[in-house]
Image: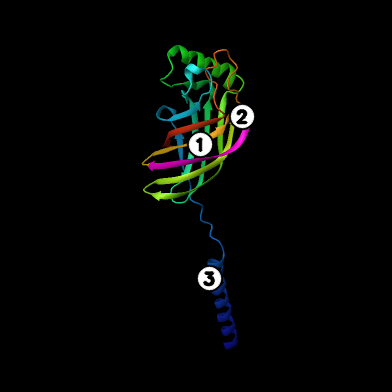
Amino acid sequence: MKAFRNLEAAFCCLVVVGTIGMSLGQPTNLADPAPTRYRLDASESKFIAHALRGGLLWFKGHEHLVAAHQFTGEAEITPDSITPASLRLNVKTESMRETSSVFTEQQKQIINKELREIVLLPEKYPEIVFKSTDVTGKSRGNGEYDLKIGGDLTLLGVTRRIVIPAQVTLTGSDLRAHGEFSINRSDYKVKATSAVHGLIRVRNEIKFTFDIVGHKY
């Protein structure tokens, strides 16, 4: 009987030790932290293409500022760890308009007509799309982050990978991201212009600046 009790005690010890070992050695099933989601608000945001022109002499040195007036999108970020994080942006090509004050209203009408009929072709390519594939960066504290957002930019049916540096601030239920990046228009087969006015003949590099606001949902 004593031998049986000793065997029973030893078995219980093995069970306890095994259970502790499993608790310590096996990964927990705790869920990954959930990202906070924000819907982008075009009415409070700015997204502008800067094109230094090289066309007619009487416009020499003037920069085109072509702003997107309509876009939708979503951003995600995990406040404590940054990732998971993502960005999706869909710009309505038809909404791209010249906004530089150096041009008269009549000149802007000509430029916008060329944008529609020669450069951006909104009837064929209704949207400019960016979808992130990876996000890296660091926190600066107080809800501020320096990020590098890698992803695919689709323009005129051509998709290329780009990396967008962005400074992101989280305040209450709002997200604000600002920064700039550049592309070569030749990579996307974007025409400079072939119209007689030549008002949007630009250099190969186009710089984009953005100041985008999103609201938690």
Q: Residues within 10 Å of mark 2 (few under 14, many from 20)?
A: few
Q: Earlier in the sequence, mark 2 or mark 3?
A: 3
Mark 2 or 1: in front is: 2
Identify the element where label 3 is drawn. helix
As drawn, 128 above or below 114: below
Residue carrying label 3: 20
Q: Earlier in the sequence, mark 3 or mark 1?
A: 3
Q: Position of residue 115 (x, y in %)?
A: 54, 19
Q: 27 and 6: which one is in front?
A: 27
Q: Which residues are magenta?
A: 159-170
Could you tell me if residue 51 is visible in this image?
A: yes
Mark 3 or 1: in front is: 1
Q: Is residue 160 magenta?
A: yes
Residue 116's tag is none
- Taking the view exactly as shown, the residue that stands out farthest to the bottom is 2
Residue 209 as seen in the image, left or right of residue 116: left
Q: Position of residue 126 (x, y in %)?
A: 57, 23
Q: Whole-Å distance between the Cαs marked 2 and 1?
A: 16 Å
